[in-house]
Image (cartoon, rainbow, N blue to C red):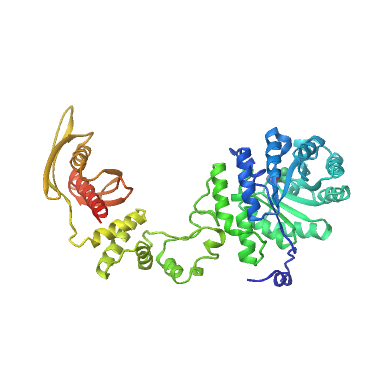
Amino acid sequence: MQDIETLKQQNMNLSDKIYIFDTTLRDGEQTPGVALTVDEKIQIATKLNNLGVDKIEVGFPASSQGEIESAKQIKALDLNSTLVGLARSLKRDIDAVLDADLGYVHTFVGTSPLHRDYKLKMSKTEIIDTAVSGIEYAKDHGLTVEFSAEDGTRTERDFLFEVFNQAVSAGADVLDVPDTVGILTPILTHELITDIKDNFKTPISVHFHNDFGLATANTLTAIECGANQAHVTVNGLGERTGNCSLEELVMSLKSAYGVDLGLDTTRLYSLSNLVGRLTGVKMPVSKPIVGDNAFAHESGIHVHGILNNASTYEPMSPEMVGHSRRIVLGKHTGANAIKSKLKEYHIDLNSEQFDKVFAEIKSLGDSGKCVTDDDLIAIAITEISSARETPIVIKGLSISMGANVSPTATVKLEIDGVEKETASTGVGPVDAALNAISDLIHDTIDIDLEEYNLEAITGGTDALAEVFVITSDDEGNKSTGRSTNQDIVMASILAVLDSMNKLLLIKRA
Ligand code: KIV
Ligand code: ZN
């Protein structure tokens, strides 16, 4: 890893201190469908503080009494992070921030032609007057002021600079550049932020949206060009497709650039989970850093590498972000992964048994089945049970069907050496037979049929039918079963019995 000094020599213009301004509780709450209660805001603010973010935008106090209340209650926690309230450049909005007892206001006014002409219906002079009077009013009331030129990236450069110059003269402490509809690219960001940094001494912040999936890349670029602060949200929440994601930015800076912001990154995963739970916005499994698959490995080649040295296929360790590694079994699984899983479950197999288990896992994967750890345990235990006992054996089957009557199946089973017979009806012959089995084994094991798949593996009326089932018992054990037969009813019964026998062996083991 390179240190900041080395990076600076490589034409990067990193600021000595990069501030993280988290706006999960404000822009993040603007995610369509998300609304947080005071208590939920408190929980998130506390975790953000423990992570170590510099600033927390707690809300938009002028928008409701509840926002003022939640800001006050968060203030009462006496956190280390600086608390910020959003305000339009209006006296009444700034008053609401003062009512909320906050010492830092984030004022904004739209500066682009679109915002001037269609939203605000104001001239350039009026925009500047609004920005300036808001900043002056806030400064007169003792607030630290961060000023945002909303839609700044679609604002004429000379007008943006004019607004920023006037904002600085009015006393703005930080100038923020919002890419309100996420239209920047890294190259455009480089040009814009370099130009701004060349012309302004005031600390520069960026607030980048993710409409084209570039928010993190653009924010990193802005930081490379000397931006002093980044606006971020947990899980990248925010208006439309969200903002730059806190966890992606912090970990990119730490892992790729060696820039340690002093945050306790081991708290990132649990923070992401809390925000996912409270907002109801679940992360896709592939979400960088915090997604379920961020540290999951399936392919044999990868797992082999990971087991020898995790860095072979992980750019950072899961422990760094409080996540955990997962080895997943499937069609790409290699022998090493299975051996490591068996070891995890303290299951010893000789090489012949192992080869059989390996082949079975591969064939399940090949047929498109997801192979769970429970499947592996079931398959391995079945293999170990020396006599390969089959406690339940089918001894007889007859089906009767007729017009306007439900099909009836009469099934005879031998269960632990004792023959039992019963008849049952169902919506079809398979259902009738499975109902009869269920009645017969009821005293031996309580089983649910969780999945039933039937496939014709050859053509014609004498086609071979392959049935694959997953059953579970009352203790939560699961097992797969499969069978191939020319008769669909028999294939179904044998698959279910296959699965039940495995479950019984697991239970008895
Ligand atoms: O995206 C945006 O422009 C904003 C402003 C309020 C800064 O969220
Ligand atoms: Zn925004």
Relative placement, left or right, of 186 versus 304 is right
Question: Image height check: is 394 above or below 307?
Answer: above
Question: Image height check: is 291 above or below 25?
Answer: below
- Where does the N terminus fall, quadrant-wise? bottom right
Q: How many marks?
A: 0
Q: Position of residue 68 (x, y in %)?
A: 71, 37
Question: Image height check: is 260 above or below 70?
Answer: below
Residue 397 can be seen, yes or no: no
Relative placement, left or right, of 31 versus 508 is right
- Quarter of the image holding residue 203? bottom right
Relative placement, left or right, of 190 versus 324 is right
- Where does the C terminus fall, quadrant-wise? bottom left
> Residue lying furthest right in this view?
169
Residue positioned 81% across, 45% down in the render: 143
Q: Position of residue 274 (x, y in %)?
A: 56, 47
Q: Position of residue 411 (x, y in %)?
A: 14, 41
Question: Image height check: is 46 above or below 410?
Answer: below
Which quarter is ligand 2 in?
A: top right
Comparing 260 with 301, the one in front is 260
Residue 207 can be seen, yes or no: yes
Residue positioned 70% across, 48% down in the render: 78
Q: Position of residue 98 (x, y in %)?
A: 78, 39
Residue positioned 57% across, 46% down in the render: 275
- Quarter of the image holding residue 130? top right
> Residue lying furthest top in this view?
404
